[in-house]
Image (cartoon, grey):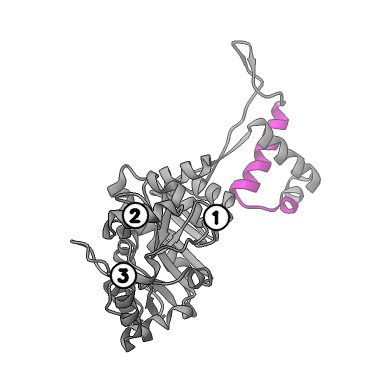
Amino acid sequence: MVRITCELFRRIVSGGVAAMELGPSELVMAAAVARRYYLAGESKVEIAAALGISRFKVARILESARENGLVRIEIGQQGPIDPDLSAQLQQQFSLHHCVVVVAQDEHSARHLVGAAAAELLAEIVTRDDVLGLPWARAVSEMIAALPALPPIPVIQLSGSLVIPGETSPVDLVRRAARLSGGESHVFYAPLLLDDAESALALRRQPSVAEAMEQIPRVTLAVVGIGGWVPRTSTIWNATSEEDREIISALGVIGEVAGVFYNAAGQPVATPLDERLLTITAEQMRGIPEVIGVAYGAAKAETIRASVLGGLVDSLVVDSEVARRMLQG
């Protein structure tokens, strides 16, 4: 929402401070031009014809009005979305799409980020898309807030982790498919296995192999972004202390759907890779549109790296994350 305020200023000297040096006739003309252009939506040519001046003079008046404070443009906040901060973050990181929400705390941030992601997805998804979903708390919130989808296929991108009180990727994919009326491709398997042999055996099972073979079809994915520190990654919580230390020593700072990466956003091979049932880094980078949905200031560096490395193309985050990313 853009709110435009036009005010007339006379030459006023108060306390030794002068405002604008415009005569009454000039002020009236400038205000008339500004109101027609900004509020009525008339073109410069239309204004020139109506007021009997040249379009070049109209342009000069508008420029002067902005410079001297006769016209003030304010970008207002609509609901929880901060359009100005969203636009800044989108421009600085060359994002396809960016939505920043203002939240009071992490609990409300999860809900608001999920709801905003649902709105963004509903806005940009087309009937030609194939939607890919892993499990993440923010993605779960998005699906819960999603009103509808066009009839598109929905594909599971990662296996499941048992988290008390949370849904699974199978649940998310099936719920999205019910909203769309499209087909769903799911597989019943853990995200992380105890050893590489068990993971390989599961990958070879027909139901799992068939579902995972669908992943290259995905044109639009929505993913969570996890940091490689306590309480910011569900995979972290499922690994041993030894695994965590080894992966940290490799320079890993975050993961997206089980794809580990460093501070530059470059994928890092880890000992867990052969034990994971999930999308690969190459497959993720091949998806035309990947929306990262995340919240919590502690994840700012991790989120920034995922964008720099090309793992994520668009973001839905809270304002604390956005400010930290902009500060560098």
Q: Which residue is mark 2?
A: 244
Q: CA distance from mark 1 to mark 2?
A: 24 Å
Q: Residue furthest bottom?
A: 206
- Tag of residue 107: none
Q: Residues within 10 Å of mark 2 (few under 14, many from 20)?
A: some
Q: Which residue is mark 3?
A: 191
Q: Earlier in the sequence, mark 1 or mark 2?
A: 2
Q: Residues within 10 Å of mark 3 (few under 14, many from 20)?
A: many
User: Is the Cβ of the residue at disc 3 closer than 8 Å to that at disc 2?
Assistant: no
Instruction: Determine whether, in the image, residue 311 is placed left or right of residue 197.
Output: right
Q: Earlier in the sequence, mark 3 or mark 2?
A: 3
Q: Nearer the viewer, residue 214 or 291?
A: 214
**Residues shaded magenta:** 24-46
Instruction: Count every numbered label the image shows and give the total.
Output: 3
Residue 38 % position (x, y): 62, 46
Residue 203 % position (x, y): 35, 81
User: Is the Cβ of the residue at disc 1 closer than 8 Å to that at disc 2?
Assistant: no
Q: CA distance from mark 3 to mark 2?
A: 16 Å
The image quarter containing residue 165 is: bottom left
Check disc 3 and give the amino acid type: Leu
Instruction: Determine whether, in the image, residue 291 is placed left or right of residue 9.
Output: left
